Image (tube, grey):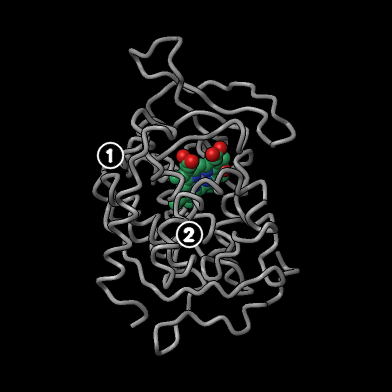
Amino acid sequence: MVYKPEDVEQVRKDIMAILKNKDYDDGSIGPVLVRLAWHSSGTYCAETKTGGSNGAGMRYEKEGGDPANAGLQHARVFLEPIKEKHSWISYADLWTLAGVVAIEAMNGPKIEWQAGRTDFVDDSNLPPRGRLPDAAQAADHLRHIFYRMGFNDQEIVALSGAHNLGRCHADRSGFEGPWVNNPTRFSNQYYKMLLKLKWQKKELGRKEQGAEWQWIARVPGMDEDDEPLMMLPTDMSLTQDDAFRPWVEKYAEDQELFFKDFAAVFSKLIELGVERDETGIAKHDGKKGDYQAA
Ligand code: ZEM
């Protein structure tokens, strides 16, 4: 056993205690913690067995300072007092656990989480930039990125349902606004909104950030002055692709199915590349791998 169960329980409680924050975004740091867990894992390449949550490479500028990770320093700073209090836990374990605890606390499903990641990486063996998805693109790009990690079409649509949570920030990604009306409560609203609302293109003109335009819509009853809901070009591509769309429809209809599939795929995401030895510690031999093959 890597950690004592009662110690992990205490970390979970300490994460729960910092989630509500009235001065931050929509009143919760939960969404940005979920994004931290995802970006720490989403660098994985199944072919070269490089990247993934083991190692916590975002501690280094080369990965942490990647424009794709803009804003995640806030999540890491929020977790720092917990790391200081429980210095035995690795950052790699803490960041993935925080995502899981946040989803559960925001009314989402229970997600299986296992310990054992280590902070073995340093500046010399980080995955290259460019492995995370680019929101300005479409279905082909999503397949290119997520197939590399070992996901299929159904899993891509299920994972995208995390956009029920949180928002885009003009000063981070260049996109702006929340996907749903209550972005701190996990649900299948994202899929419902994708199918139900009348989406219109809005020019953003943030070319240097790769955010030239996005989709916006208002739910009936919303004022012209209210902040509209938004969708990224990649979000909308899920409704425009023949293999993705049936899953959007299923998840919009059946929240229970979405929760079940999301729990499975999120735990698969945070396990990518984490192979444990007989003591439960994640191995990293050979993980220095071929980082040329991004
Ligand atoms: Zn996101 N995501 N994401 N995502 N994401 C953003 C925010 C959040 C994409 C993407 O470009 C963006 C997944 C998949 C994909 C979350 C979770 C997960 C933002 C806004 C962008 C631009 C960042 C900002 O400005 O702060 C793309 C293209 C994806 C491909 C499908 C997956 C998978 C996720 C988890 C399972 C979350 C929770 C947020 C909200 C963060 C926050 O700060 O509120």
Horizontally, residue 210 falls left or right of residue 95, namely right
- Out of 63 and 200, give the one closest to the viewer: 63
Q: Residues within 10 Å of mark 2 (few under 14, many from 20)?
A: few
Q: Position of residue 217 (x, y in %)?
A: 46, 21
* Ligand 1 under 8 Å from disc 2 Cβ: no
Q: Quadrant of residue 116?
A: bottom left
Q: Residue at x 65, y 33 (%)?
A: 211
| Depth order, front residue of 66/150 | 66
**Position of residue 151 in the picture relative to residue 44 (left or right):** left
Q: What residue type is disc 1 on?
A: Glu
Closer to us: 223 or 195: 223
Q: From this viewpoint, is residue 78 visible?
A: yes
Residue found at x 57% / y 43%: 71
Q: Residue at x 57, y 54 (%)?
A: 143
**The label number, if any, that marks residue 152 in the structure image:** 2
Mark linked to residue 253: 1
Q: Circle 2 sits in a helix, a strand or a loop, which is it?
A: loop
From what the image shows, is residue 20 above or below residue 270?
above
**Side of 101 relative to 57 (left or right):** left
Residue 193, image x, y percentages: 38, 30
Whole-Å distance between the Cαs marked 1 and 2?
Answer: 21 Å
